[in-house]
């Protein structure tokens, strides 16, 4: 997937995923394709990867996620896309569930959700 940060990257990314590439694969530095696209300022590729199910949560070896990398690189548009994705994800959670773990506990009746 990392080659898809080159020209025609969206088409390449779609092709690689269709051929079985793992969207969450990491390079030797621990970066996912979403992290690389975010750090490189590739807004369209960031959106495509999010639309195709890439997680915003993984962190690289320095502890940075895609949003932190975009902030460090000064890519405001990418930061906004990632923030919008985070807000959309949060809006889908039941009231009181701040994390996926909270939601799973709630969904399976294993924990009380309080407001």
Image (spheres, helix red, strand yellow):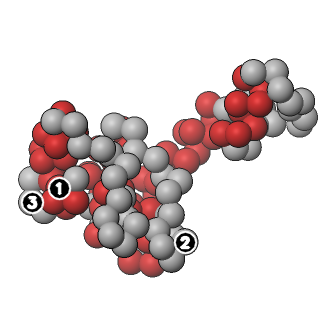
**Circle 2 Cα neighbour tier, 10 Å, few/some/many (<14 / 14–19 / ≥20):** few
Residue 54, numbered label: none
Observer-side mark, 3 or 1, equals 1
Residue visible at 55% across and 47% down in the picture: 86
Task: Give the residue number, with chain letter if any, for mark 3.
Answer: 7
Which one is closest to the eye, mark 1 or mark 2? 2
* Residue 79 left/right relative to 8: right
Q: Residue at x 51, y 70 (%)?
A: 64
Residue holding disc 1: 4
Above or below: residue 37 compared with residue 72: above
Query: Quick check: marks 3 and 2 in contact, CB under 8 Å?
Result: no
Q: CA distance from mark 3 to mark 2?
A: 28 Å
Side of 104 relative to 115 (left or right) = left
Image position, residue 75 (x, y; %): 37, 70
Give percent across and percent down for residue 37.
Answer: 30, 61
User: Could you say which quadrant of the image residue 103 lies in?
Assistant: top right
Res. 105 in view: yes
- What residue does disc 2 label? 63
Q: Residue at x 16, y 59 (%)?
A: 3
């Amino acid at each position: 997937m990392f080659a898809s940060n080159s020209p025609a990257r969206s088409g390449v990314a779609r092709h690689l995923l269709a051929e079985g590439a793992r969207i969450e694969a990491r390079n030797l530095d621990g970066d996912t394709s979403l992290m690389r696209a975010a750090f490189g300022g590739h807004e369209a590729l960031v959106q495509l990867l999010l639309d195709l199910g890439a997680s915003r949560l993984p962190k690289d070896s320095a502890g940075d996620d895609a949003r932190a990398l975009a902030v460090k690189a000064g890519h405001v548009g990418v930061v906004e896309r990632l923030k919008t994705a985070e807000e959309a994800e949060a809006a889908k959670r039941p009231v009181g569930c701040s994390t996926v773990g909270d939601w799973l506990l709630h969904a399976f009746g294993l924990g009380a959700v309080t407001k």
